Each structure stands twice: as C-alpha cells, then as structure tokens.
Image: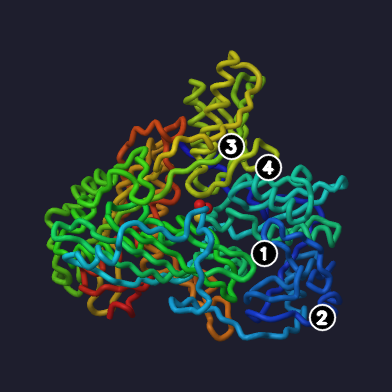
Amino acid sequence: MNRIEGRVKVTGLATYAAEYPVEDVAYCCPVQSTIARGRVTRVDAGAALAMPGVLAVLSVDDPPGLTGDADAELALFGSRDVVYRGQLVAAVVAGTYDEARAAADAVRVDYEPQTHDVRLRADHPGLYRPEVVNPNLAPDTEKGDVEAGLAAAAATVDVTYTTPPLHNNPMEPHAAVALWAEDGRLLVYDSTQGTSGDRDAIAKTFGLPPEQVRVVSRHVGGGFGSKGTTRPNAVLAALAARAAGRPVKVAFTRQQMFDLTGYRTPTIQRLRLGADADGRLTAVEHVGYVQSGRLVEFAEQTATPGRVMYATPALRTAHRLVRLDVATPSWMRAPGECPGMYALESAMDELAEAAGIDPVELRIVNEPTSEPDSGLPFSSRSLVTCLREGARRFDWDRRDPAPGIRREGEWLVGTGVAASTYPARRGPSRATVTVDEDGDFVVQVAAADIGTGARTVLTRIAADCLGVAPDRVHVELGDSDLPDAPVAGGSMGTASWGSAVVRACEALRADGGQGTADTAEEVRADEELARHAFGAQFAEVRVSSVTGEIRVSRLLGVFAAGRILDARLARSQFIGGMTMGMGMALMEETLTDDEFGGFLRRDLAQYHVPACADVPAVEAVWIDEQDGLLNPMGSKGIGEIGIVGTAAAIGNAVHHATGRRVRDLPITPAKIL
Ligand code: MOS
C-alpha cells in the first residue's frame, strides 16, 4: 500500500500549520533575551510601535496573565526573570512578516544581568538526585553488591562517555496560526505530535475549558519529540491574535527553534562493568549526569537501559541532575535510551576487548531470563535472534578482532556491533467508526501523522478488522475535535490508536455493521510484564589515516518489534532512526556558549545532519515476533528503536578500524588524528 497522503505531499497540496489560508492574518515575530540570567528592567517599544504596519507589542511590561499550569515555559511574558538566553521577552505583531521582523529588531530591552552557569559537570555542586526520572521511573536502583562484583571480575572497565546537547531539526519548523471566534472559541492550526494534548495544554495556559479550544494539525513535517508537547509558537500566536484582534501567524525560524523548541540534554555517563573468565557479567554500574533548566524540571532517564538489558548479580543505576541557566531540555527521539545505550553498548564493547571475548558473544552469554531490574517476565524478547541474524548477514565469524590492522590505501576499515532496545508502551485512546452513505467506513481518531504514515497504518488496521479493502476505509486524524488520542511519541502511537480502532471496528461488526461505534480502549489493566522491542546494529566504517574523515560504508539493523504492520512504513522508521543515530555518532552537536550562555550552533549550516551522500548503504530487516501480550495488533513501537545503539555500533567500528576509542560524541576527524 502506498502512503495515503503521499500524492498531496509530493505535489505540494498538503497543508501545514503556517499554510492555512486565513483572511486578514497578521504576523508575529519574537524578541529573545540576550542574557542568560537576570531581570528585564525596561522594555521600550516606542520605536517599534512607530514602524509601518505594527499592530501591537507584547512584553513583560504588560503581562498577559497566563497561568503556567500546563508548563511554566508557556506562561509567556509573565515574569521579568530571565532564566536562559533566547527566552521570549517580547514580540511584535504586524501586518506582514517583514514588518513584524523589522520592528522586533527595534524593540529595546534593558536587563540587569546576573552571573550565569550553563556548563554541565560531573562534579557540579548543584547536582542532586531527582524524585523521579522520565517517564516516571525511580532515579536510582541497586541490587547486589557492585563493588564485590567488580573485585571478583576477571576483566573490568571503568569508563566515562559524554554526549553533547542535540537538537531536533524536523523539516517543518514550528509554526501556528491562531483565530479567536466571536463566541470566544480559540482555533489553532499548530504543528504538533498530538492535538488532544496540545488542546489541553493551550486551554490550561489560557485558563479556558478544553472544549473552548480546537487544534488542527493534519500534516506535520516531522517532530521527533520537539512537537510532542505544546511549544511557544501556539501560545504566542493565540496571545498575539487576542492583542491584535485578528488571526495571527507565527512561524519560527530555524535559528529560533534552537532556543524555543527543546533539545536533548548533554550527558556525562560513567560505566563500571565487570565480567568473569567466561564473559558473564559480575557487576554493572551506570551513573548518568544530566541537566535541566530553572523553570521546569526535566530529568532524562539516561541510565535506565541497564535495568532491561543484561543478566548480572549486581546492578546499580543512578541519575544526578543539575538546574542550570539553560532552556529546559525536552524530548528527542528515544530520550534516555538513545544516549544511555550509546554509553552502555560502547562500554560493553570495551569489556569484550578487555575480556578477550567476541562482542556478539558477550551479549549472548549475558542474555537474561527475566527483566534484570524488575524480575518480570518478558512478553517476548528476541535480542539473541537479532544478534545472530545480524552476525550472519555481516559475515561476523570472519572478523579479526584486532583493532587498527585493516588498510585499503589510506583507509582503515573496521566493524562494530551494538544492541538496541525501546519500551513497548501504549496509552488510552478513543476512536469511532461510522458507515457513510456509500457504505464506506470513516475512522475518526485524534491521532497525528508526523510523517510516519499513521493514516496509512490505521487504514490497514481498520480494513483488516472490518474485512474490507483499504480503499473503503477513510481515516480522519489531526484534529482535537475528533475522539481523544495520545501523542505520536514514545513509540506508542500505533499501539494506542490502533487498539481503539480495532475495538471500534469490532463493536461496529457486533452491531451488524451499521451506524457508528465509539470505543475507548483502556489499557491500564495490562498484565504486569516487561514489554520491549530489541534489535542489533552492525556498522562498517572507513577512516582516512590522512584526514581522519570517517565514512560509514554499511549499516545493518536487525529488529524484533512484534508484528510489523506495514513493511514499507516500518523500514522507513528503522532506517530514519539509524540515519539519525549516524548523525549523533559523527556530526550532530550543539555548542554551549559559556561566556554569553545559550547555544552557538543555530542552523543547518553548522548543526550537521546526515545528507544522502553520507548514507550509502543502510539496511533494516526484522524478526517477526508473535506476541499476544501487547495489544490487538501484536505490534511493538518502531519509531524510536532505530536510533538506539547506532552511535555505539559506529563508535565501536571506529575503534576496530583505528584502535582509537573516542568517548566523546560526535566522533569528528579532529578527535581521531
Ligand atoms: Mo518521541 S521523543 O517519543 O516524540
């Protein structure tokens, strides 16, 4: 099946948030703080207000009275306190975008600056143990005696890995158009990963009942987490529309996105591992140091993968967090698992070398029979099958483990492996199915298609359940007036929405296939089991001994994620994740500016993501799992697992090629030479 919206997308007919034709629309452009910490003492809007087309200037001089019940970062212009560089301190509304932008430059903001601190350090005096880490996990866990396990080990590693701040760069920047109706109802065309949650957050921020707000988001050009929660573009558009008495459009520039739409926290991760002479783990300790902002605590679950991955008699995981003068970190594809598995799977490679054991075998001998931390049985777990299948496809048995010895001219060649994992969760969702006058089926659910193919897969799920051809099913999504649905995030969209769609289709069938069936699928009663997808990633790299340039000549991912519902869509998700993981390994890095606070890289010329020429051969294959303990489709999420483990596989391959162990991402030529 082709993607249902494929044609309108590639012909430019798909309408994105900033593109809705709205009459009499005005434009709003933000003014951002130029200090990282302090107070706004004065906003002089005089010059801006005198400029052509200017309708209003919003600022802390006239606080709009937003509640901040949803998120303190959305209570715009409510406080004179500046808590990070780039924070919104004012905004200009004008008749055209250019007028708004020119006037924004003319708004004069005076500050009383204070000393700021934007640098994450493992010895920072402000570090503390958060109450919980995302999504609601214990910050620390401990079982067995780590010190005794390390003392008894035949081989140990004690290594520290660091990852930089990373930014989501979806193709479609954040944008919103807001319209207040005469009856006071607010309509927002937003670019969001979930209209139900976005509606609720906007309503809370404005102190409105949720039914007074409608969010429409039919097409979304990517999100990766940056559109998983409401962002200031939506609130700013609504505020500006209220002030101007006209519909208002806000379209953030790529540069503004770096300050206003979240980022992946930098991490410092210390791993201590021990193994006996057979490679059996005797101890695993993983401590993650991460940062948050001053307004909201965001505690990424970086050190949690060890709770899932390997059998060990002693396991300690811990998180330490520090509140700095930075924007609050946020969601980025596989938050927690992605940086955490980078460090754990790199350290496992170092342990394999220290113990003289093949890195695939090291993982296989440490395969647990139940989830290591909780002791819960797995609903299904096919990591070993993935490792063996990947090893077969990669001719792993012919690999010489010695690093730095394969040379083709100036190029050093090496291969590496790493495991992947991601939880298989779902949330409560509603859906309705209605028979229309032609006898076709209309499926309604406030799901989001952020480029993943949600429309297409939900069409297949409904057609399957109804026993009709897919072209007789019409899926409506991307509108908060449709039945409530959870966010397209946490790799749980399809599992959650699909469960509700199946229940609604079953109810319609039970009713004789007439009328409408509206079903809420509650999932809270799920049996207690460890539900995770797993995978194995293999990388081949070539590193120039002259320039240090690193080329990934081959990437292979073998995944086990339950039943794969649509092969083409699944492959896109897997290779998209792997490509993003390659960016993390070799290119992506947002530099933090100690002197002025804030970020120094703010566009795609400086924040490098992989281009087509960087990804010559990415293959994704999968092991079909029959797992009846997940949801009616038997599926696990596939949106995030592709990025988990990729950076470790590439880093491990770079070590195999060169003999150099770079423990600080990204692995750039300067770190190799
Ligand atoms: Mo993703 S970070 O779960 O939107």
The answer to whether any part of residue 13 appears in the image is no
Which numbered tag is attached to residue 480?
Answer: 4
Residue 392 locus on image (x, y percent): 18, 48
Looking at the rendered image, the disc whose residue lies closer to the viewer, 3 or 2, is: 3
Whichever of callouts 2 and 1 sits on the residue coming sooner in the sequence is 2
Q: Do the residues labelled 4 and 1 touch (CB within 8 Å)?
A: no
Q: Mark 1 points at which residue?
A: 73
Q: State which quarter of the image contains the N terminus.
A: top left
Colour logic? rainbow
Left or right: 366 as drawn, with respect to 490: left
Q: Nearer the viewer, mark 4 or mark 3?
A: 3
The image quadrant that residue 57 belongs to is: bottom right
Which element is circle 1 on? helix
Q: Quadrant of residue 91?
A: bottom right
Q: Earlier in the sequence, mark 4 or mark 3?
A: 3
Q: Do the residues labelled 3 and 1 touch (CB within 8 Å)?
A: no
- Could you tell me the amino acid type at mark 1? Glu
419 relative to 493, above or below? below
Secondary structure state at the residue bearing disc 2: strand
Q: Quadrant of residue 352?
A: bottom left
Badge 3 or badge 2: first in the primary sequence = 2
Task: Check disc 1: other Cα within 10 Å, few if <14, some if 14-19, many if 20+.
Answer: many
Secondary structure beneath label 3: strand
Could you say which disc has been placed on residue 429 in the image?
Answer: 3
Q: Which amino acid does label 4 sit on?
A: Ser
Mark 4 or mark 1, earlier in chain: 1
Nearer-N-terminus badge (3/1) = 1
Q: Where is residue 645 in the image (x, y as percent from the top left)?
A: 34, 57
Q: How far apart are marks 2 and 1 (CA)?
A: 23 Å
